[in-house]
Amino acid sequence: MSIQHRNIRQVPVYFLWLFFIFFAGQGFYHHSYSESSGVAYKQLKAPLESGYYKAISFGSDKLLSFLLLMGVQLHDNQKGMHVSYRHLDYAVLSDWLLTIEKINPNSDYPAFLASRVYSHVDDKAKIRLMVDVIEKLFKKNPQKHWRRMTEACLLLKHQLNDLPAALKVAEQIADLPKGIKLPFWARDMKLVLLDELSQFESAQLLISSMLKSGEITDKDELRFLQARLLKIQQVLSKN
């Protein structure tokens, strides 16, 4: 059975127009989709001064800070799609977290977002900005934010592989006044990092002074320090 081929001139004109419109529509659709998923992404706008938000809250600082945080968190969902945190301007995001904390200083949520949410991005510069936010909040209220500071220490150690920077953060925790209540493991992070950085002499002096001070009465903590001291002494004797 032979197949007969029709000349294109024999195809009705209206059919060719429909064919052209169909492909033009396809091209427009794909172009619009790519625009909405990338170029059309709207960045966060910088926050206003915290005093302005307090003025318009009419005493409902907690409610307004919650609404602002929800707005920031929902910003990565645009046009029905979730946008990667990599697209966020982290300098502006940092300003938002710090501003919202000023509106409601009793909230730990901005520091929580910095350590547990926005730090989960494959971008070292962005992670470091979140660590800076945590440090600033910690200095304002160590008792409230010490736990986030320990998480910042872990971020520096494991995600950025920056042990010297992690040690500086751990030192800020260890040097807190005794009046600030926090578990021994938080203060002991400095000892662990000194050990990992092979600063055995410094670790030995620190543990010895802690044991001699008589301030540590917890039996588990004493056993931990004594075992750590013995390990360090053994390493130093071999060297």
Image: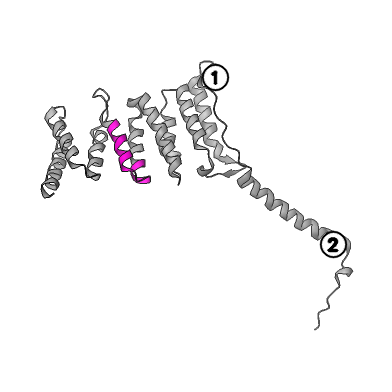
Instruction: Look at the image and tell me in which quarter the N terminus lies.
Output: bottom right
The CA distance from mark 1 to mark 2 is: 62 Å
Asked if disc 1 and disc 2 are in contact, CB closer than 8 Å, the reply is: no
- For disc 1, the marked residue is 52
Q: Name the foreground residue: 84 vs 239.
A: 239
Name the image quarter holding residue 40: top right
In the image, is 157 to the left or to the right of 217? right
Q: Nearer the viewer, mark 1 or mark 2?
A: 1
**Residue at position x 14%, y 42% in the image:** 227
Measured from the top left, where is residue 109 in percent x and y?
43, 30
Q: Name the foreground residue: 147 vs 158.
A: 158
Q: Which mark is residue 234?
A: none
Instruction: Examine the structure image and report whether residue 130 is included in the region drawn in magenta.
Output: no
Instruction: Examine the structure image and report whether residue 171 is included in the region drawn in magenta.
Output: yes
Neighbour tally class for label 1: few under 14, some 14-19, many 20 plus, Cα within 10 Å: few
Name the image quarter holding residue 44: top right
In the image, is 68 to the left or to the right of 183? right
Q: Amino acid at mark 1?
A: Tyr
- State whether residue 47 is above or below residue 185: above
- For disc 2, the marked residue is 15
Q: Amino acid at mark 2?
A: Phe
**Residue at position x 25%, y 37% in the image:** 190
Magenta stretch: give its range. 155-172
Measured from the top left, where is residue 90 in percent x and y?
49, 37
